[in-house]
Image: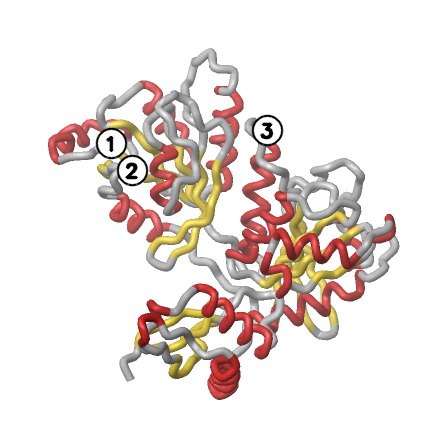
Amino acid sequence: MSSIPVVAIVGRINVGKSTLFNRIAGGRIAIVDDLPGVTRDRNMTLANWTGHDFFVIDTGGLAPGSEDAFQESIREQVQLALNEADAVILVVDVMSGVHPFDIEAAELVRKTGLPAFLAVNKVDNDQRIPLVPEFFKLGLGEPWPVSAQHGLGSGDLLDAVVEVLPAVEQSEEHEVSLAVVGRPNVGKSSIVNRICREDRNIVTDVPGTTRDSIDTQVSWNGNDIRIVDTAGLRRRTRKMDNVEFYSTVRAWKSISRGDVVLVLMDATEYPVQQDIRIAGKAWEMGKGVVIGVNKIDLGIDKDLWIASIIQRFHPARWIPIIFFSALTGEGAGRILPTVIEVARVREKDLPTSEINRKLMQAVEKVQPPTPRGKPVRLFYATQIGQRPPKIMIFSNRPEDIPENYRRYIENNLRECLGMRGVQMKVIYRKRKH
């Protein structure tokens, strides 16, 4: 599978890049403030527009010639973001007119040769429309008037952006793509070497040795597996150095390429927030997920470890957890069989009769609620998608089904249908009779 495309948002300080980022991401993720240069580290998230998935990166504000000590680093990181991007949005401020910094930023964008879109921000009313044509002089084509704060024009801009993004191609038939991810120094390269039975990657005790993703082809029991070994994902800090930023972008792109994600954790410490964030991102993206706990040769209480991760990450109860030692090889033989099993579950074609039999068993065991004396009925269910499996349940009053009953139904279907290691999406739709 090819990686999900990347859209970089660039521009000078305080033109509203973070506000546009939040608008595209569908929530308030970046820190938004009137203080110039607030975005010091990079924000990156998965976005979707009209069925097109893409990563969007919010970069720091450019201020060429500024005495700000962060500026050299920001410019370098903007360049790194552009190196990874498939398209770029240059944001400018309609109220400021064409600023000298805009000209420098436009030149930086033009040199990349990427599809570029000029977003003229803060066009909050019709009176500002006549100010937009001035930005033609930046040489990036037709300016797109938008109001990131109010959403005006952002839909038209995104329609144009997704049209130029490369399509995400699926893996070759019968090939499973496995992304190996985790914090630095948890043993990603070591376990890939162990799986491959040869030293294909640099293995050291220095965190962050693997800076780029390296694909390795292996075969197990007649199954072709493409392994992507990624750079370690660090906890985000206020000042992320350039190589770490580059590695993080690459790692998220590698996750997007995987059918299954092996999330590596360190047996010598209980799961930390970054472990949960990595596993949660893979789960949220609909990937098959396997949790690998490395370094058991150093001693571990497995029951306590499992209880710890389930307490902090609820979906872990549905995810295979493998304990192994990349150093000695103990337990490593379970990895590829489990990956293949999860990949098959993710693309399962479930018989409609079996789905409905399990649904009716769950309903008979615990009847749906009766809010305001009006009974809720679940009529039937059918699978509407794969990778991950999606099931639609028809009901007379889906809006009245409480969250706890939805979880009950989903958990029962997941357990009865053997949905292990994948997110199973259940959608309810209204049917009158």
Residue 84: where, in percent of width, then height? 50, 41
Q: Could you classify mark 2 by the number of other residues whose Cα lies within 10 Å: few (under 14), some (14-19), or many (20 or more)?
A: many
Q: Find the distance from the CA under tag 3 to the CA under tag 2.
A: 28 Å
Q: Are marks 2 and 1 in contact (CB under 8 Å)?
A: yes
Q: Residue at x 63, y 42 (%)?
A: 233
Which label sits in the foreground, 3 or 1? 1
- Above or below, comparing residue 401 to residue 381 in the picture: above
Where is mark 1, residue-wise?
Answer: 122
Q: Residue at x 83, y 52 (%)?
A: 300
Q: Residue at x 37, y 47 (%)?
A: 26
Earlier residue among tags 2 and 1: 1
Q: Residue at x 76, y 51 (%)?
A: 200
Q: Which mark is residue 76?
A: none
Residue 432, quarter of picture: bottom left
Q: Are marks 3 and 2 in contact (CB under 8 Å)?
A: no
Q: Which mark is residue 148?
A: 2
Q: Amino acid at mark 2?
A: Ala
Residue 365: where, in percent of width, then height? 52, 81
Label 1 sits on a secondary structure element that is loop
- Above or below, comparing residue 264 to residue 96 in the picture: below
Residue 293, quarter of picture: bottom right
Label 3 sits on a secondary structure element that is loop
Where is mark 3, residue-wise?
Answer: 241
Residue 227, quarter of picture: bottom right
Q: Is residue 351 visible?
A: no
Earlier residue among tags 3 and 1: 1
Q: Nearer the viewer, residue 283 or 318?
A: 318
